[in-house]
Image (cartoon, coloured by chain):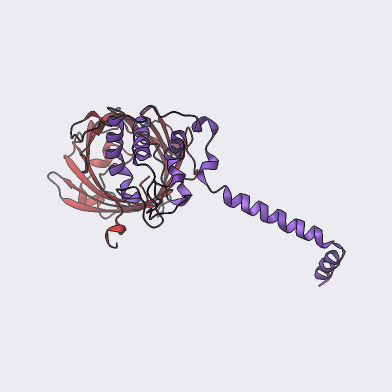
Chain colours: A purple, B red
Amino acid sequence: MRHARHLNAIAQRTPLSLVYRLAAGLLAVALCAGASDSWLLHVPASYRRKVNPYAGQPDAIAAGGRLFSDHCAQCHQPDALGKGKRPSLRTSYIQNATDGELFWLLRNGILAHGMPSWSMLPEPPRWQIIAYVKSLGPSDGSARGEENPK
Amino acid sequence: MEEPGNLEISMKNTAASPKYGNTFGSATVEFEFGTTAWWTTEFYLSGQTTANDSTVFNGFRLENRLRPLLHEHWINPVLYVEYENLNKADRSILEVTGHNGVQDYVVPNRIQRPEIERSLETKLILSSNFRGWNISENFIAEKDLNESDPAEFGYAIGVSRPFALAASPRACTFCRENFVGGVEVYGGLGDTNGFGWRATSQYVGPIIAFTVPRGPTIAFSPNVGLNDNSLGVLYRFSVTYEVQQIFGRFHR
């Protein structure tokens, strides 16, 4: 009871603007925390700059298509358009990501959201998968999965 | 770790001819399910047959693997906890701990079968991937739950690499990329009463695995015993098949 009275006294002495500022600050922190869920924000600069040694090579794209079919299509669907909570890989979000960013994603996965790490797969096949996914291009808005995968 | 939603079914076979004992063959069926991207759960059933003796069911194992770090590092730890309910006639030799040795595999089944061992096994698995090489180190601690036996320790170290890193553009069965080769070393490290190599069994051997495109993975590994307490040669053979998105098959 004494504790409640003490809090009440503090509230009466605290200017209203300070309460608003405090609330706005907390809201900003919450929004930042939510935004940091996006995997792109975790990608180090060294990965963003990585260049896909197989980019645009028809053989690599064909090999990547086979690898995609073996390892990725089970969740992201054979057309890479996703389904339910399994995101489309043909959204502008993925298609505009750099090859290095996608390489980081394949290496680390997003374990908390169900995307496994593919670090067991050597680097060349991971680059081949990226070459294939990029070759698909953005979809025409018919994506069934989430627009912005976590 | 298994991919989430996938079920991997594996038949692991072991065969050996111990000195002064009968040739035996053991079969273990393993069901491995990817619960999440950081948690895999497994269930094993084991049995064995011994020449001039009998065929017996050995029991089950229930295991969970957890990956505590959500990002990839140079060394990626996985915590492994397994409950075993097996009789002492078990010959699966999925791992070696304590002072297990050739003397355990020459006792007749009728004597070992009634003795049930319930134990808790924990492993710290450290795995690294570098330029196509996978390097894995396991540190094992096992405690019998219904006896006052000391905790037993063991280890396993393995290195493997695909024969080709990049995938070929055309589908092919016997491409180099479908083969993986490696070497593994494993053995006991004694127990809390005597930690170390003394009176333990140790093995080393190559391993070769072949994945049939869109089919099973077949692996073979002849392991050589490195001391008198080990079996002379231990043959391992496994067939593994992965059912992708097992629950997704029942609803559309």
Q: Is residue A9 above or below residue A25?
A: below
Picture quarter with the C terminus of chain B? bottom left
Q: Furthest-bottom residue in view?
A: A1
Residue A67 coordinates in the image, percent (x, y): 29, 39
Residue B199 visible within the image: no
Q: Residue B174 versus residue B84: which sits nearer the camera?
A: B174
Count of numbered tags: 0
Q: Furthest-front residue in view?
A: A140
Residue A55 visible within the image: yes
Q: Residue A25 versus residue B47: which sits nearer the camera?
A: A25
Q: Quadrant of residue B101?
A: top left
Residue B81 coordinates in the image, percent (x, y): 42, 49
Residue depicted at x 45% and y 47%: A111
Left or right: where does residue B147 sit relative to residue A18? left
Residue A35 coordinates in the image, percent (x, y): 57, 49
Residue B136 coordinates in the image, percent (x, y): 39, 34
Q: Is residue A12 above or below residue B4?
A: below
Left or right: where does residue B34 sit relative to residue A69? right
Picture quarter with the N terminus of chain B? top left
Q: Is residue B19 above or below residue B34?
A: above
Q: Residue A24 versus residue B55: which sits nearer the camera?
A: A24
Residue depicted at x 54% and y 40%: A42
Q: Quadrant of residue B129?
A: top left
Left or right: where does residue B251 sit relative to residue B23? right
